[in-house]
Image (tube, rainbow, N blue to C red):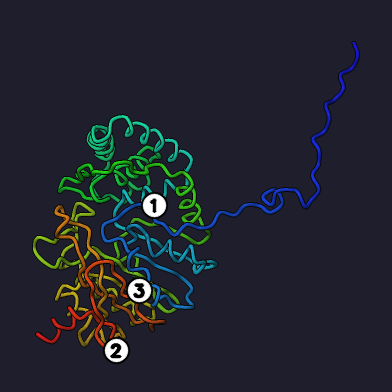
Amino acid sequence: MAPQMAGPSPPYLPRDRVPISAIVPHHPVPSARPLLKWAGGKRQLLPELRRFYPAEFDRYVEPFTGSGAVFFDLYASGRLDGRRVRLADVNPDLVGCYRTVRDQPDAVIAALARLEAAHRDRGAACYYDVRDRQFNPARATHAPGDPASADRYTPALAAMLIYLNRTGFNGLFRLNRRGDYNVPAGRYANPRICDAEHIQSVARALSSTGVSIECVPFEQALSDVGEGDFVYCDPPYAPLSKTAAFAHYTAGGFHAPDQARLQTAVLAAARRGAVVLLSNSSAPEIVEAYGGRTAKAAGLTVRYVPARRAINSRSALRGVVDEVIVTNAVATGHPKLRMAKGRLRTSPGAGIPVAAEARARRA
């Protein structure tokens, strides 16, 4: 039997005809887009918040991570390169989801792709089946709010949380007093549920050297901050009215005593030399807490910015309101108060919306 001849080798292209992707390894561009939609997410305020990012710092600390909009913005811009990052949140579902995406992105993507296919077939019926017969029963094996439950999160649970977030009403995360997730289905014609490339990008950000994700209260996250630290706090907002209250990101909620404890921790961090940046509503108690003599002595100032609120069952009641940025950082550039609707004007020189200035004068 005659030996078989090897087939011809594939032709080699001259170097100037080889695709550039075959010469230069592909490095995905970091994504600044958060993994989850989150009530009070800060993407719309980023142009204002960026004005207070310090040029130099050793560690970034975020005790209310939520969607992590500021973290992802800092990461995408390269400001976190070579720096330590401490992300924290008291919500074990959020922390468990982030850790699982970080450690097992492929398994999360596979589970989410299956949920996307089921949603295409069944729509809202699929949503309620996942919420009531799968997600909540699986979480019921964990004590509500137990930080240890974040360690027991699985790719299936993480995928379900992302799915419910993508398809639920306004992208909310809300728990009832029993700790059950109770957000109704949203009305989306064709939601993008499984974005594999984006999930991989988020996993790369969370697995970067020096990044930790902890399920701890804000006081613990802030306990050791000081000189060289950059801290951003985005707590559940103080309500502007009784009907505007929405703080049930955990079964225990976040109320006036919690806001007072946070103010104490923020002032202590500022006194220890940390660069502090905080956002909240313009509720009178917040303005008083951070605009009073004690806060000013710690170097903090209060600035008003307009933002569009999206949390309301009636779309007509969603609109532009004043929020506050509290910081001891020096601002750079000029404020850009761009809102498509509302037509807020800026008072001369101060960068304060006229609506807020008028209230201050009446007071």
Q: Is residue 124 left or right of residue 361?
A: right
**SS for dot 1:** loop
Q: Nearer the viewer, mark 3 or mark 1?
A: 3
Q: Give residue 131's position: percent from left, percent from top.
A: 25, 38
Residue behind mark 3: 48
Crowding at mark 2 (Cα within 10 Å: few <14, some 14-19, many 20+): few
Residue 115 spot, x, y in % from top left: 36, 35
Residue at the (9%, 60%) spot, across then down = 243
Between 282 and 85, the one lying in front of the other is: 282
Count neighbours of disc 1 (C-alpha within 10 A) and say few if under 14, some if 14 to 19, many if 20 or more. Answer: many
**Residue 35 got which mark?**
1
Question: Quick one: SS at disc 3?
Answer: helix
* Label whose residue precedes the other's in the sequence (3 or 1): 1
Mark 2, secondary structure of its residue: loop
Assess whether mark 1 and mark 2 are in contact (beta carbons under 8 angstroms). no
The three-letter code of the residue at mark 3 reads: Glu
Q: Which residue is mark 2?
A: 349
Q: Nearer the viewer, mark 2 or mark 3?
A: 2
The residue type indicated by label 1 comes to Leu
Q: Is residue 177 left or right of residue 233?
A: left
